Image: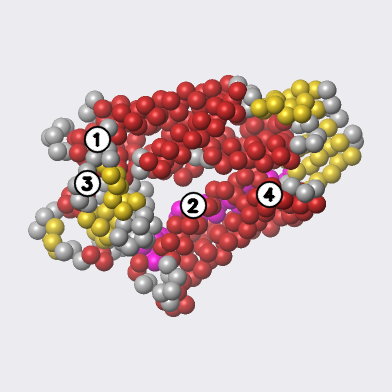
Amino acid sequence: MIEVNEDNLLRCHICEAVNIDKGEETTCRRCGTIIYHEVFSTQKSWAYLITAIIAYIPANLYPMLITKQFGAVEGSTILGGVVLLWEHGSYPIAMIIFVASILIPLMKFLVLIYLLISVKYPIGKDKSVDKHKLYYMTEAVGPWSMIDVFVVAILAALIHLANVEIVAGTAATAFATSVFFTLLAAHAFDERLIKENK
Amino acid sequence: MKLENEDALDNLIICHQCYTLHEEVPIKDGTKAVCSSCGGILYRYDSKLIEYGLALSITGLIFFILANIFPIVKIELLGHEQFITIPKTFIALFDNGFYVVGLLCAFLIFIFPFMIFIINIVLFTLLKFKVGKTFSKELLILLSHIKPWSMSDIFLISILVALVKLIGYAQINMGTAFWALVVFVIIDLYITKMIHTSEIWMLRRRIYENKGYR
């Protein structure tokens, strides 16, 4: 017989098994993943997040899509592409691209920064925000940022004639890197810390 | 709370949305258990889970193969006909020198979805014949690692967005693979929504441990 405090139980983020919190380093009894590491509790997530934010800057400055039409080369940035679509009257598509490549990444950065700060410092003590739900939502919408990268890939693969050609721009690499690292940051975030700071 | 040993923890479940602790209770065939505080689905019980899982995975794989060998869309631009397939999408990125994006796309829209369906097929086959206790465990762990990185559904929406951008410039014809991809994505979403990884863990425990198989 072992006595367990209910607050000391945590879920493995890989296999979802319930584990007893053994302090500094708990490995999941079912899949062996390290669930918690005192020393690097938020650092890993911070590192990924900062990389993502840095990569997001060139992603917005450089052209995402370069159109070569009869010798004329024209590049459009993410925001430029949205504005162009809006002016052409494709409002739904402009909205999709705007939400997926500007709104979602920015929201994700802010939410993750808030979560990472709030689990360490007292500003997160207010209970009005359900941080578990907030984290769950961020994880769920995060991958949708990839839409713009896929669109560029499809257009680049589809249109490559002698006179008219679409190629991906520098921003495609930067943006893909940014999304990739935001996803890593979200995965690296330790949900147990939310529970601890309630 | 008192527990007999650590294995008794398997009877507990923590909601993946709100982190509330619940005890697992036997439920009727075909019903589901929901979280008492947030209403999220905790687990389902279905006595035919293995058969459904296997059938869906095989169907999904067939459609995935179809979606990869036939053209997704054909366009007519200035009298030239162009088409794309899924592999061509990321190979074009490689050709243009975008190795990072190309590699990322290759994993997200081709390698991971393919792996998930292969793993599902092997996993359900192992469970059906009640063999491979450790191997099924390794497969389940691998599956949990790659599941968040499969983005076929997002790719499908991207195709539609890309095509809307082309309206007015080119004549667009949907290819066979587009419809195959639609079916594949529906099956993929259905499996992700209806067969949760924790349910396969529960199933695995019922199969290997209660019947004393080793």
Provide the chain ID for the residue under circle 3: B
Return the mark for residue A92.
4
The colour scheme applied to this rendered structure is secondary structure
Closer to the camera: disc 1 or disc 2? Answer: 1
| Residue found 43% across the figure and 61% down from its top | A133
A27 or A191, nearer to the observer: A191
The answer to whether A71 appears left or right of A63 in the picture is right
Name the amino acid type tagged 3.
Answer: Ile
Residue B164 shown in magenta = no
Q: CA distance from mark 1 to mark 2?
A: 29 Å
Name the amino acid type tagged 1.
Answer: Ser
Residue A175 shown in magenta = yes
**Residue at mark 2:** A140
Name the amino acid type tagged 2.
Answer: Ala
Q: CA distance from mark 3 to mark 2?
A: 28 Å
Q: Are marks 4 and 3 on the same chain?
A: no
Q: Residue furthest right?
A: A71
The answer to whether A15 appears left or right of A106 in the picture is left
Mark 1 or mark 3, which has the lower sequence index? 3
- The magenta segment is A169-194
The answer to whether A148 appears left or right of B11 in the picture is right
Q: CA distance from mark 4 to mark 3?
A: 44 Å
**Residue at mark 3:** B27
**Residue at mark 1:** B47
Q: Quadrant of residue B97?
A: top right
Closer to the camera: disc 3 or disc 2? Answer: 3
